[in-house]
Image: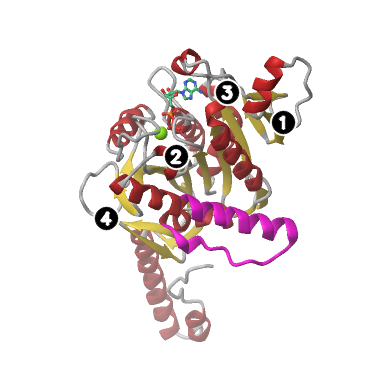
Amino acid sequence: MKQGLSKIMVAVRLRPMWKKEKEKGEISIVKILDRNVVILMDPADVMAEEKVLGKHRTKEKQYAFDFAFEENAPQLELFKHTTKFLCEGVLNGFNSTVFAYGQTGAGKTYTMLGDEQNPGIMFNTMKEVFKHMKRHQIDREYTIRVSFLEIYNENIKDLIMISNDVLDLREDPIKGVQVAGLSEIEVHTPDEIFELLVYGNKNRTQEATGANETSSRSHAVLQIICEYKEKDAGVKAEIKVGKLSLIDLAGSERAAKTGNRGLRMIEGANINKSLLALGNCINMLHENNSKGQTNYIPFRDSKLTRLLKDSLGGNCRTVMIANIAPSSSNYEDTHNTLKYANRAKNIKTNVQRNVLNVEYHISQYTDIIGQLKLEIQGLKLQLGQGGNAGAALNHNMPSKDKRND
Ligand code: ADP
Ligand code: MG
C-alpha cells in the first residue's frame, strides 16, 4: 500500500434470487456485464417487454464500478478483489475500512461474516493477516487484537464483553477516534476468530421486522488492530499501528417500507440518522473532490460517521461493497443503493502510515546511563589527575530523549 491520495474502491455484489422469490414469480431486473457494469431495468419495462417483444428499453440504468460481482461469485473471489490487498497494509501500519451497504436481505452479513462452509470477508481477512504476519515475524514483533462493537439506536455496545454499558467515542490526537472502554482481545490464530465472530454476531440486536424476519437493525464493526515494532530498533522504537475496520451496516431501506410502528419506528429513525449522516458525508466529500469545493463535512452528526471519520475523510484506504438483490420488488431500494454507491466512487482519502514514536526498553536505557556514569566517573578521575575535558563531557551527556513528531 502506498501513502498518498487514494479513491474509495466501490464494488457491487448481486445476491442470487431466493427460492421463495422465484416461487412468487419475481423476475430478475439486474444484469452484470464485464465484471464491472451493473444494469438495472425498470420492472414495468421488463413486464411490457415480455408482452411486446423487441420493445426498446428506455428506463434502463447503467452504472460502472471498480468491480461488480454476479450472483454466483464465491466468497473468496470477493475477498480477493476487495480486501486481500489491504491485509499487507494493515501489517505495515496503515488504516483501512471495508463496509457492506445495502437493504436488509441484500447479503451484507453473508458478505462480511458468511457461514462456516462459506466464511466471509472478516474470517478471510484474519487468515490473510496471520499469513503475512508469519513472514514479517523474522524481524518484527507483532500484537494482533480485535474488537467487535455494534451501533444500535445511536448507542455503542461491546459485542464480545457483554454488558449494559453504553460506550463513548473519544478523539485521541495520535490514535484517532477511539471507543473508550471497548474490549480488545488478543488473538494468536485465525481459527480463534470465527467462533468469536459468530458469538459476537449473535449478540447483535436483531428483531423481526416487516421487511425481513432476521433483519439486523444495527451496524456491526469489527476492528483488527495490528501493532508492531522492529526487533533490532535499539533503545528507541517506533511502534506502528494499523487498523482494519470491517463493517456490516444496518439495512438501508426506508423505515416506512417495513411498516414499522412504535419502537421499531424509533429504531428506524435512528438507523436512518446514521445512514443519512453517512450519505450526507459521502455527498459532501463527493462535491469537494469532484468540484474542488471545501464544504464542511458533517462527521459529527452520528455515531457511525464519527467512527468512520478516518475512513472516509482522512487517513485510510476505504472499500465499499454495495449489496443488491435481483428481484423486481426491490427495484426502488436497489436503485437507491446503486445511486449511493455511484456517488461514493469519487471520494478520495489520504493514506498515511500511523507511527507512534515511543521510548521503550527503559531497562536498556538505564543500563546505558549506568555505563555512562561509570565512564564519567573514570574520566573525572583522569581529570583530577590533570587535563580539562569537563566542558566537552557535559556537552555530550545524554539528555532525556524527546518524542519525535
Ligand atoms: P443482510 O445482512 O443484507 O440483511 P443477509 O446476508 O442476511 O442479508 O442475506 C439474506 C439471505 O440471503 C441469507 O439467507 C443469505 O444466506 C442469503 N445470501 C445473501 N447473499 C448471498 C450470496 N451471495 N450467495 C448465497 N446466498 C446469499
Ligand atoms: Mg445482516
| Disc 4/disc 3 C-alpha distance (Å) | 37 Å
**In this rendering, is residue 54 above or below 323?**
above
Identify the magenta region. Answer: 275-302
Mark 4 vs mark 2: give the one in front.
2
On whether residue 296 falls in the magenta region, the answer is: yes
**In this rendering, is residue 81 above or below 165?**
above
**Residue 348 picture location, percent across and down:** 66, 52
**Which element carries disc 4, helix, strand or loop?**
loop
The numbered dot on residue 166 is 4
**Residue 338 picture location, percent across and down:** 62, 38
Q: Which residue is located at x 46 percent, y 76 percent?
A: 397
**Which element carries disc 1, helix, strand or loop?**
loop
Determine which residue is flagged by label 3.
77
- Could you say which is closer to the camera, residue 257 or residue 51? 51
- Could you say which is closer to the camera, residue 44 or residue 145? 44
| Disc 4/disc 2 C-alpha distance (Å) | 29 Å
Residue type (three-letter) at the residue carrying disc 2: Lys
Of mark 1 and mark 4, the one earlier in the sequence is: 1
Left-right relation of 300 to 203: right
Mark 1 vs mark 3: give the one in front.
1
Residue type (three-letter) at the residue carrying disc 1: Glu
Which quarter of the picture shows residue 365? bottom left
Which quarter of the picture shows residue 202? top left
Determine which residue is flagged by label 1.
60
The crowding category of the residue bearing disc 3, from other C-alpha atoms within 10 Å (few below 14, some 14 to 19, many at least 20), is: few
| Disc 2/disc 1 C-alpha distance (Å) | 24 Å
| Disc 3/disc 2 C-alpha distance (Å) | 33 Å
